[in-house]
Image (cartoon, coloured by chain):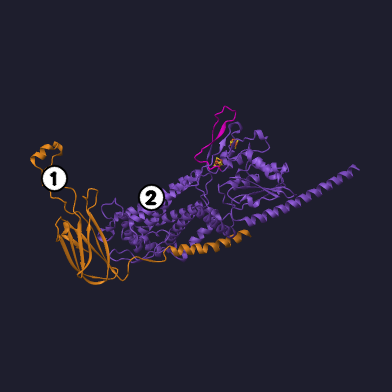
Amino acid sequence: MLALKLLLRTGFEYVEDCFDIIFGAKWNPFYQLGALGWFYYWIVVVSGLYLYIFFDTGVTQAYESLEYLTHEQWYAGGIMRSLHRYASDALVVMIVVHLLREFAMDRFRSARWFAWITGVPMLWLVFAAGISGYWMVWDQLAQYIAITTAELFDSLPFFGESIARNFLMDSKLSGRFFTLMVFIHIAVPLFMLFMMWIHILRHASPKVNPPKELAIGTFSMLLILSFVKPALSQAPADLKIIPATVNLDWFYLPVYPILNDVSGITVWITLILATIFLMFIPWMPPGKKTPVAEVHLDNCNGCSRCAADCPFSAISMEPRTDGSNYKLEAVVDADHCVSCGICVGACPTATPFRTKSNLSPGIELPEDKIAELREKTIAASEKLTGDDRVLVYGCGKSLNPAEITNEEVGVVTMPCIGMLPPSFIDFVLSKKLADGVFLTGCRDGDCSYRLGIKWTDARLASERDPHIRKRVNQDRIGKYWAGLTRSKQFFNELTAFRQRLKKLSLLETETAAESKQSSEKVDV
Amino acid sequence: MFKLRYILGQIIAFIPFAMGIGYFSDSPSYTYHDPEKALIMVSFSHASEHKDECRRFSQEELSAMAPNMRRPMDCSRERVPVYIELMMDGQNLLSQSYNPTGLAKDGAASIYESIPVEPGQHEISVKLRDSSRESGFDYEGNVSINLDAKELFVIDFRKDHNGFNFQ
Ligand code: SF4
Ligand code: SF4
């Protein structure tokens, strides 16, 4: 399982690297799978609403009304129908890839079980919505789906009367089935929307909209596809004739051919076991829960920055309980906290300039204390020699520090780069522990803890508290978001950074010498 | 400049995605029934007779019962299996027993069989036993049919509608 996950993760990262070149990190669809899912969902809803206006729910009229939309009103109804179909297919692709990717990247552990577990039922819902949709067309595919689905339900021991029998003779076919299908086809997506909302409930600033350019790109793709290959019905259903050959939508109906060879009950058991297995993945070994962030009220001034930066909405600001003059205090919800440390990076009291004995910030991770980070920083820099000494701060989800460390480069890692308070960079440079500080972590746009890179970039650019101090020479800060796979580019960037540092040192020595000379002249 | 590169990139990447979606949304087609054959379906549910005959309670038995539980007849709930035999042109296509449904075996037996056959003229004979008799049948139906390829022929059974019903 671990090997499979690593293989999947490496595979994803290599493919995503290619997509970074093609789309750019900002538009890379792999970093927007959830948001794209939402986008496809809305296309399906809007196009579905249009189709519903013209759709006739009678047994015989359903097919005709869709034929009218497809052929007579091809420019609107036909396009809407095609968009409805293709966006639904794209939605299935997004959901499956999203699930595989979150699994590969290990993003389901600790408090993230919630998003995982609320995502799994979505698979059932999306298939139920899709299958009921194909049923409503009442063409030969619908006839096949109706009989096969009914047979699948008949294989369960709860139904006394066979449902499939209703689809063998026209005389037995009831309009009520159609009403039921329409109901399912509307109710299931509505319930799905509710589940999608629950799914992202614990995420601060959830990504529900893809970047505009990607949205335009993907919508244009669906639109062009709708013109080039309009979605069509198959021949009308006729219960006296076996369709024999059907054009399956393989995104929604891959299970159906299996039912020809395997009993319905076996399929049910397999599907249910697979769902239970998926549900339990967050608790599979090695599922050690790391201790969650702790608030030290003695040092918390109630500034709310930790709450604003926590990507998992795990911190709330509550009225003070320790009688201090501050109004609020940070409170961590242990069930939501994933121990990323991003809150520590946001806390103004997490600074290495404070004396070692008093280095307990308002909030910190019990297993990655700020005092330890300071010690590691000093220890890593002590070994460095030369005039291009670099201290790399990296996250535990990206490059292996052992590969990077040498005489000129020291490495300090933490759960997420968002845990690094900007004051540490100031500390390293002002105390001359290194000539430059280089930051790395997951790939740009794909922080394992969602917002670590975003907040780090914003803090360095002084766009978000805590800002980096003005006195810090930004030329001595480098960064490259490498992930697991981009070690070659990482080393290229690091080498280039060190060359810049060398030049900078040279320039500074020359400037210092010149100013010394001119001051000597003045003295003379 | 970069944007143009990424826009071109999007176009290049979306073409195979669109082709994939367009293709797999209705292809490859799937054949689940031999198009050269017709299909006979035997499909109905039928409540067979009870396993044991009803018997009248004796006076002693009745007086031993609580007044609100007294009833004249003692009938077992369990039903016998439904046995069906289907012959086509003298050839046996189906001979099978179907157990009654329900935990107490008191429900109707459900029969749902599909049998692909060659198209053409056929003599169909179907027999059903739903009582505890050892041999022979309680219902029989015969029909002469001419089936086309892919045609569905349904054999239904309804006790209250003279037994077998062919469609
Ligand atoms: S470590 Fe801090 S930022 Fe990360 S989830 Fe926990 S409370 Fe939120
Ligand atoms: S950022 Fe630090 S000081 Fe501010 S509320 Fe959070 S724990 Fe307290």
Query: In the rendering, at what x and y percent does residue B9 appear?
Result: 57, 62
- The residue that mark 1 highlights is B74
Dot 1 lies on which element?
strand
Q: Nearer the viewer, residue A240 or A493?
A: A493
Number of the label disc, if any, that sits on residue A187: 2
> The numbered mark 1 sits on a residue in which chain?
B
Say which of marks 2 and 1 sits in front. 1
The magenta stretch spans residue A329: yes
Give the residue type at disc 2.
Ala
The magenta stretch spans residue B67: no
* Shade of chain B as shown in the rendered figure: orange
Query: In the rendering, at what x and y percent does residue B53 appear?
Result: 13, 50
Side of A501 where A200 appears, left or right: left
Dot 2 lies on which element?
helix
Outermost residue on the left side: it is B59
Alpha carbon distance from label 2 to label 1 = 48 Å
Residue at left offset 15%, top offset 39%: B69
Hey, which quadrant is residue A70 in on the image? bottom left
Q: Nearer the viewer, residue A513 or A194?
A: A513
Outermost residue on the bottom side: it is B120
Side of A428 where A450 appears, left or right: left
Graded by Cα atoms within 10 Å as few (under 14), some (14 to 19) or many (20 or more), the crowding at tag 1 reads: few
Within the displayed image, which quadrant is ligand 1 positioned in?
top right
Which stretch did the figure color magenta?
A317-339
Kindly tell me whether residue A57 is visible in this rendering: no
Number of the label disc, if any, that sits on residue B5: none
Q: Which chain is purple?
A: A
Residue at left offset 70%, top offset 45%: A381
Query: In the rendering, at what x and y percent does residue B25 appear?
Result: 43, 62
Q: Main secondary structure of the magenta part?
A: loop
> The numbered mark 2 sits on a residue in which chain?
A
Q: Nearer the viewer, residue A492 or B26?
A: A492
